[in-house]
Image (cartoon, helix red, strand yellow):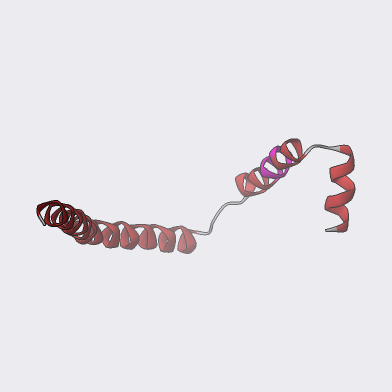
């Protein structure tokens, strides 16, 4: 934190953020994953995609249900 405050005196926060993101991005660009790790990441990505695909119908049904309940309450309050 001490170093960040020192940098903050000489460089604005936006410039510091851009430089930090560029530095972190360049480190990742030179790293190559071993074949096993790349395979595991592919499997995890596939699993997450499957979970998201399975959850969307539930999220849609809940959203439609909550909106329907809200509209029903609104109509019931106007009728009474």
The residue depicted at 14 percent of the width and 51 percent of the height is 78
**39 lies above or below 9:** below
Q: Quadrant of the N terminus?
A: bottom right
Chain part drawn in magenta: 18-23
> Residue 74, percent across and down?
18, 53
> Residue 45, percent across and down?
37, 57
> Residue 17, percent across and down?
71, 42
Q: Is residue 22 magenta?
A: yes
The residue depicted at 62 percent of the width and 49 percent of the height is 28
> Residue 50, percent across and down?
26, 60
Q: Quadrant of the C terminus?
A: bottom left
Given residues 12 and 25, the one toward you in this image is: 12
The residue depicted at 86 percent of the width and 51 percent of the height is 5
Q: Is residue 20 magenta?
A: yes
Residue 21 appears left or right of 34: right
Q: Residue furthest left?
A: 79
């Amino acid at each position: 934190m001490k170093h960040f405050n020192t940098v903050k005196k000489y460089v604005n926060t936006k410039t510091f953020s851009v430089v930090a993101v560029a530095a972190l991005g360049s480190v990742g660009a030179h790293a190559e994953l071993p074949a096993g790790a790349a395979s595991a990441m592919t499997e995890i990505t596939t699993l997450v995609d499957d979970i998201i695909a399975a959850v969307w119908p539930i999220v849609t049904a809940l959203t439609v249900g909550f909106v329907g309940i809200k509209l029903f309450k609104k109509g019931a309050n106007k009728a009474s």
